Image (cartoon, helix red, strand yellow):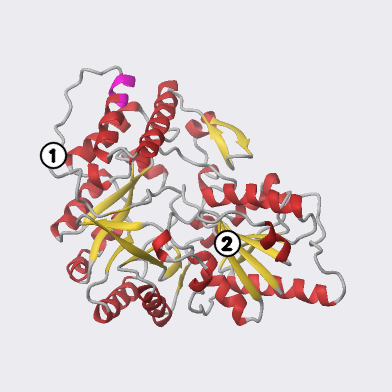
Amino acid sequence: MRTLLVSTYELGHQPLHVASPAAALLAAGHEVRCLDLSLEPWGSELVDWAEAVAFSVPMHTAMRLAAVAARQVRRRRPKLPICVYGLYAPVARDAEIAAVADRAIAGEYEPALVDWFGELEERGRDGTPDAPEERTAGPPAPTLHLGRTEFGIPARHLLPPLERYAHLVLDGEERPVGYVEATHGCRHRCRHCPLPVVYDGALRVVARNTVLADVEALVAMGARHITFGDADFLNGPGHALRIVRAMHERFPDLTFDCTVKVEHVLDHAHLWPELAASGCLFVVTAIETLNDEILARLDKGHNAADAADAVALLREHRIEPRPTFLPFTPWTRIDDVLELLEFVVEYELVGNVDPVQLSLRLLLPQGSLLLERPDPILAGALGPYDQERLTYTWSSPDPMVDLLQARLAELVERSAADGDRPGLTFERVRAAVLEVSGRPDAVELAMPSGSVEGRPRMTEPWFC
């Protein structure tokens, strides 16, 4: 069957969540083409060629973009079967998605995708090709698959080369980056995260040999750095360490980064010397906020003191922390944002933080665990569901917080478009926060020398 897999956005890296199911579909005998809309334009010939289309939706932004693209497909081919699959497939309960998607698959989606395309192929043999599943009055109920799956080596040859994706910036040069995952899911249940909605604390391991074979293929394609994109690389610390050891033995000059929860940075302190010696340059870690009450509401598993300790521990082993933040929530006060900026300066993190992180606002998609627990502040802040943005709207009890968030979002977007240095953007952000707080003349912490430039980073800023 002629199958088209489409990625709209995967954080600037070559989309694993298209390459992996492509391999499974090829193995099942289907004819597969892949399209990455972050780099490649729509071509009507591809849509006309396909007998079914599946959109990868591993994150919120990808789902929003997929909804737009799927509507374009539906207008051109009204009867073409369309599927959305990935972490954000549960959002397909939204009416806007339901209008264009016949099937939604979450969790370990490869077997379900193979089955779906197989069913469509069989239906075509029966004389009803190019026919979508019978539509009901409501949205499609997402199909959830958490069974253990044998993963093949991703079919990366169907995608644009690594040179067209985000690079690592290090020592004045840009290095091609490959993206792999050693595990799926997460053992934790942070309440603002989409992972527990799908995996509910479950973890699925990708076989070590499969991960290493994918790394080898990426190196052959020119990768000089590997990003381990697991939700938390140390959810399975033994598995992670075995992969890193083998990778370093085969490719001693290859560097890498990974994502690790603050609590796991501290709980597995004994691992960092070996990880550093094996090429770990930086660790993405979700600090979110320094307000301990908000961290408790989010079930983050750490507090502000832990965040400071994690930064110090990583630095002790010459690994740079790259914090991610969630500065704006219904519980946020202006002082919380000020405290976050002071933390960034005090711990010399200006060059480690993508400026977009300073403006992010809590998303509340359908199914968010935050909506399950009674919370008077959140209940009072909630507004209607925004079908375009795929989130419930909310307003801060303090209108100045909403004003500040909108101002910072505009500021960092403009700075990114202009190519401004992160240090300059940070200074503008801090000035805006001080002005809105009513303290434009407040004494500012001096920005430490070396805290801005020279830190390893990606050319694509991180956001969800």
| Residue closest to the eye, 55 or 33 | 33
Q: Residues within 10 Å of mark 1 (few under 14, many from 20)?
A: few
Q: Which residue sits at x=25%, y=18%?
A: 440
| Residue 434 falls within the magenta-colored stretch | yes
Whether residue 112 sits left or right of residue 48 in the image: it is: left
Disc 1 to disc 2, C-alpha distance: 44 Å
- Tag 2 secondary structure: strand
Q: Residues within 10 Å of mark 2 (few under 14, many from 20)?
A: many
Looking at numbered disc 1 in the image, what kind of residue is underneath it? Pro
**Which is nearer the N-term, disc 1 or disc 2?**
2
| Residue 115 falls within the magenta-colored stretch | no
Measured as percent of width and height from the top left, residue 172 is found at 21, 54
Q: Which residue sits at x=32%, y=32%?
A: 337
The disc label shown at residue 35, or none: 2
| Residue closest to the eye, 20 or 395 | 20
The span picked out in magenta is 432-437
Q: Residue furthest right?
A: 127
Q: Is residue 457 visible?
A: yes
Q: Which residue sits at x=62%, y=72%?
A: 32
Q: Using the image, determine if residue 362 lies above or below residue 92.
A: above
- Tag 1 secondary structure: loop
Looking at numbered disc 2 in the image, what kind of residue is underneath it? Leu
Q: Which residue is mark 1?
A: 448
